[in-house]
Amino acid sequence: MTSFQSTAPLDCRSDALLDLSAQTIRNALATGALQPIRTESTLITQGELSFSVRWVSSLALKDQARVASISTRRTDFNPFLPPEPALTVTSLGDGHIVVLNKFPVIDHHLLIVTRAFEAQTAPLSATDFRALATILGPQGGLGFYNGGRIAGASQAHKHLQWVPDSALRADDGFAAFSRSLRYDMPGIAQYNAALPWQHAFVSLAGIDWCNPAAAGQTLQDAFATACRAVSLPPAADPMPPYNLLVSRDWLLVVPRRLEEWQDISINSLGYAGSLFVRSPSQIERLRTEGPLAVLATVGFPD
């Protein structure tokens, strides 16, 4: 297995990881190891914010049934020990490997998995943040972490996640949520009064993405700052439920108290303006309630 380390030029951009991911995707599709779930999408606009809502396509009902049958396993089943070889993209330093999401609704949806078992409720470590920085630096995109089942985690084995910029609309969600904040104030927790749930943003202005170790330390420091701002202990074991989102520009922490709104599961991507439902009928309930109210309900209303 190839070990990916960033060897990008000074602007820290390289397509090396995406090239490896694309090759792994092609091979995994050919063997059936990768089983994408086809979706349709629509927009729900609330005020000046828009939310992308995906649902399982009518053309994918067979896929949905197949996924359900394959994914029905023992509650103690761990798909990451070991991960399927056909889904494994690369190693990432000594502590992590990069794996394709077996049932993706987003292309190039990558999982950053610890080699040895650690609980999804364990505190994020310096090596976790360095692994995330190693991908965010060259690739951009959005990294995220579902801190425990209540925060939307589907697996108990610690794994961060990453999706490319192309997976999210440039004018909604994460970018829009942070647009009114002061980017030139790194290291200080900030809040967007338009978001009716407890949260804390920290600007990543000036971060040295060309140095994954330094970038990882900056991310860890920013995470601790955001956690303290919302009364989360950043090194508790186990951690209380929370969602973490990280772009090249901002880090966001959202404490969680519920995993679902009615029968709709919400994970970190909800706080990036991207929601997933099982059927079109759930979309109308989301539209009636309003995505902001839904996200406030599963978080802590501010």
Image: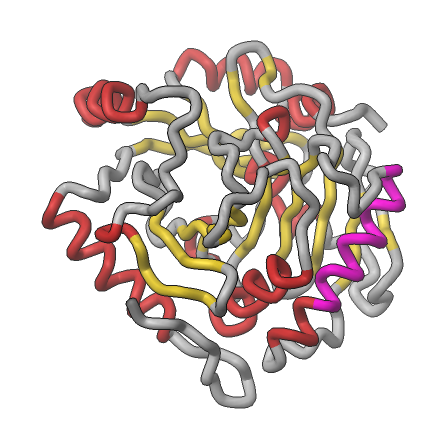
Q: Is residue 162 visible?
A: no
Q: Residue furthest bottom?
A: 10
Image coords of residue 17 (percent x, y):
37, 69
Q: Is residue 219 on the magenta stretch?
A: yes
Instruction: Give the colour scheme of this rendering.
Output: secondary structure
Left or right, 109 with respect to 87, comes to right
Foreground of the two, 142 or 115:
115
Overall secondary structure of the magenta section: helix
- Residue located at (56% from left, 44% from top): 118
Q: Measured along the vertical axis of the image, is residue 142 above or below residue 263?
A: below
Foreground of the two, 255 or 47:
255
Q: Residue furthest left?
A: 30
Image coords of residue 60 (percent x, y):
22, 26
Report the number of numbered marks: 0
Image coords of residue 14 (percent x, y):
42, 78
Image coords of residue 276 (percent x, y):
46, 29
Which quarter of the rendered picture does the N terminus lie within? bottom left
Left or right, 273 with respect to 257, comes to left
Foreground of the two, 134 or 203:
134
- Residue located at (35% from left, 54% from top): 108
Q: Is residue 241 visible?
A: yes
Residue 15 falls in which quadrant of the image?
Answer: bottom left
Q: Measured along the vertical axis of the image, is residue 134 above or below residue 125?
A: below
- Residue located at (68% from left, 22% from top): 298
Residue span colored magenta: 217-231
Which quarter of the rendered picture does the C terminus lie within? top right
